[in-house]
Amino acid sequence: MAQTEEWGKERRGRLTAVLVLATLISGFGSSFQYGYNVAVVNSPSPFMQQFYNATHMERYGAPMEGTLLTLLWSLTVSMYPLGGFFGSLMVAPLVNKLGRKGTLLFNNIFSIVPAVMMGVSEIAKSYEIIIVARFIVGICAGLSSNVVPMYIGELAPKNLRGALGIIPQLFITVGILSAQVLGIRNILGNSTGWTLMLGLTSIPALVELLLLPFFPESPRYMLIQRGDEKTALRALQRLRGREDVDAELSEMRLEDQSEKAEGRLSVLSLLSQRSLRWQLISIVVMNMGQQLSGVNAIYYYADSIYASAGVKQDVIQYVTVGTGAVNVFMTIAAVFIVEAVGRRVLLLCGFGICCGACVLLTVALNFQESVTWMSYGSIACVIIYVIGHAIGPSPIPTVVTTEMFRQSARPAAFMVAGSVHWLSNFTVGLVFPFLERGLGSYSFIIFAFICLVTLIYIWLVVPETKNKTFLENCQMFAKRNKVEIKLGDGDLPLTEGKESLEDAARVTAF
């Protein structure tokens, strides 16, 4: 028993310099760009539209019609999530071929090229360049939003996987906040600075391109998918900061054996794989809930809420920055509490808070003209919603996606999750203006309902995945999927304390 406890303590991973730096570099180099490019066109939009109009005037000798300007600006905004969708479709083939780190390095092409294009757009007198560049940088975001959590999740030991898995979302929020700060009129959000602001997205990519090659590829990818145990061993030793990593290698070999018994999964076969049915449904529900819960609509509505509360127009940009800062702070809080309270609790609390905030916001918006102080209640509802989304719906779905699937299914799972994420994002951006025009403030009741349905599903179906191996998480879903997880023909020697791994690999058929 003492030996078992000692082995269990030894297996608990710790933060090492290599693990921390690999996490920070990949997060800053890729996830930061996702957030930055979400918000980068918001503040300078009046000046960008002036450029569109001036360019049209110079070309055709007449000002641009309002409908054409609206269409071009809608394309500028919507090309980003559309590119994200196509980037998600590229995840599985790229990470299987190039590896996790290799894909992140390759992905920098989709950041540096559009950054140059957007930076020279004013000199080239072409708004078409901006629209095309937004689509290309969207591909970068679609890849990074899926590959970074996968890479970090496979580098991290199981007891730190949740905390480190939130780091990509933290960098997304920092990216949004950075764009909001740089977008202040006195900094770059003006007629002379907007092209530089758009082009700055290349800096994180260059940092990642220079530094990430010095850090290891995912050991799980090297051992299970490439069969290169020596490289996997060296990578694991660097990441854990010790020579003895036999226990973790044994767990990877066991996962490899169980996958060989079932056969390798292609992207298409994932959808019909009975053993992964409920995992797949769960990531679809969580990603739809994340994007259809109204988070983008809340940000869309925020400026008008602040204005109705009496906030001066030139001060609203600073209040928006403050909201972004709250988002960053709460995501940092999630990093520190996720391993203590678990993924499931944060998801339930987050969606519950968002649901309540949407209901209260509907009430506040309907009464803020007749009740003087109610406008401040609207501001409070926006902030409460941001807090709720930041602790659960925003960061946790990618963590859970990493933990629900084994090695061969994970790339395809992230491709499905990412596609749902970006399509839902695109849908909200497309539909919300019409929804708001037809229902007004009552549109938030729809978002409250979506939050409630997602919460109920998580409560009934999604188990707690913290501090468990990938095989143990598959075991939890085996009964619901009514399948049997088999170990391969090769027998692995077991050492003291590894019985739980053996149990996780053999699940009774139901």
Image (spheres, rainbow, N blue to C red):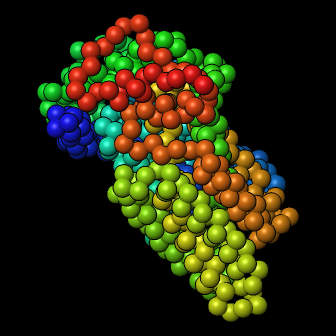
Farthest-out residue, front: 1
Q: In x, y percent, where is residue 10?
A: 19, 37
- At a point 61% along the width and 34% down the height, the residue shown is 480
- At a point 75% along the width and 57% down the height, the residue shown is 432
On the question of residue 92 being in view, the answer is: no
Q: In x, y percent, where is residue 431?
A: 77, 53
Q: How many marks?
A: 0
Q: In x, y percent, where is residue 371?
A: 72, 91
Farthest-out residue, bottom: 372
Q: Is residue 279 rendered to the left or right of residue 103?
A: right
Depth check: 276 or 47 in front? 276
In the displayed structure, would residue 294 be above or below residue 80? Answer: below
Image quadrant containing the N terminus: top left
Depth check: 26 or 346 in front? 346
On the question of residue 420 being in view, the answer is: yes
Which image quarter: residue 423? top right
Q: In x, y percent, where is residue 322?
A: 47, 72
Which image quarter: residue 191? bottom right
Q: Is residue 432 rendered to the left or right of residue 277?
A: right
- At a point 67% along the width and 68% down the height, the residue shown is 358
In the displayed structure, would residue 502 be above or below residue 291? Answer: above
